[in-house]
Amino acid sequence: MDDRIVSGKRKPEDTIDAALRPKTLGDYEGQERVVQNLRILIEAAIKRSEPLDHVLFYGPPGLGKTTLAYVLGAEMGVNVKVTAGPSIERAGDLAAILTHQRKGDILFIDEIHRLGRAVEEVLYPAMEDFALDIVIGKGPSAKNVRLNLPRFTVVGATTRLALITAPLRARFGAVYRMDFYSHEAMVSIIKRGARLLNVPLEDAGANEIARRSRGTPRVGIRLLKRCRDFAQVRAEGTITAHIAAEFLSNYMEIDELGLDDVDRRVLKTIIEKYEGGPVGLETIAASISEEADTIEDVYEPFLLQLGMIDRTPRGRAATRIAYQHLNIPYNAKPRQENMFD
């Protein structure tokens, strides 16, 4: 389990404060391309007096997929029912949810890639034909009954698009990728959060938190709350650039690029123990006492995003950027000539 403060995954302490969620697309910061497409989708549906097409959001955790589902509900003036793929264990569970949908309502399914195959089979006709097929009885006397459902919208969210089956993916009319947020968008999100939380925050303090938030709003709000606590105890409550930098660097060990101790350990292992690589993922995992899957799914994506490691056929290698960030002299390895040249 990834329990780091810079993880985009939701944690128990990430209490959902409804006031911090944008209510409309006008309040939503960042993801400009996605927002523009959603405006068109919503306006067209309203003009036709129809429910929205089924929508799928995919991308790393903490980027606002759930928030956008609520925004869609608010913009369309409909109810949003929230569930998650792992929570729907049997086809009957999904059938119970679907029969309570009203016309135009949104069914938001988080981690939709974790739906079971039997559950998906029930979802297909519900999304395509707005019908629910139920088998009554057993054996030769069993019969199939089809219940008509009101037209509703499924909004799915996933961090692993490749794990969604092709038939399910094909039933979504609109598919949008959520990218990491720009620094400017993160500053705006943190300033808005500070206003809603009544936290005194200087512009330079917001900038300092934003640059360490890994382009992820959930991480940014989490860091803002922790900086608020530190400022109230040590600095009369106001978050300045100095307070934010001191707390995040010295206490949380998060550097100016958002790397924490585990990220730096991965890089230093590649550089110092294996001369910059390439080195296999299993070897790195054994060196830092972590699981290989955890490194690949949790730590590696952000390091790849920053361009600090390369994936090669022979393993992972640290780049010049990683050496520079860690203040380690970079010595490019000589090119290995082909012995048959």
Image (spheres, rainbow, N blue to C red):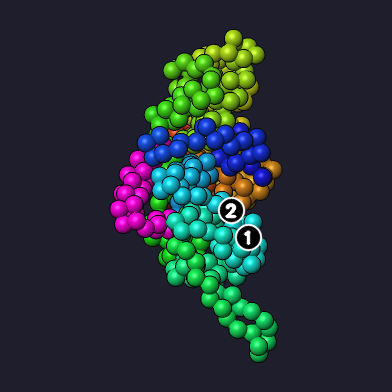
Tag on residue 88?
1
160 or 71, nearer to the observer: 71
Please report contact status of discs 1 and 2: CB closer than 8 Å, yes or no.
yes
Q: Quadrant of the C terminus?
A: bottom left
Magenta span of residues = 28-55
Which residue lies at the image location 59% right of the left edge and 10% below the top edge?
Answer: 235
Q: Position of residue 173 (x, y in %)?
A: 38, 60
Tell me if mark 1 has few (under 14), some (14-19) or many (20+) residues whose alpha carbon lies within 10 angstroms of its own. some
Tell whether 286 sits left or right of 51: right
Principal secondary structure, stretch drawn in magenta: helix
Residue 162: x and y in percent read 49, 59
* Residue at the (45%, 37%) spot, across then down: 23
Residue 125 against residue 305 in the figure, above or below: below
Tell me, yes or no, if residue 189 can be seen here.
yes
Foreground residue, 4 or 64?
A: 64
Find out whether residue 287 is within the magenta segment.
no
Residue 298 shown left or right of residue 175 in the figure = right
- Identify residue for label 2: 83
Magenta residue check for 35: yes
Is residue 126 depicted above or below 138 in this figure? above
Is disc 2 placed on a helix, strand or loop? strand
Cα–Cα gap, marks 1 and 2: 8 Å
Picture coordinates of residue 201, whole percent (x, y): 49, 17
Q: Residue at x 40, y 57 (%)?
A: 51
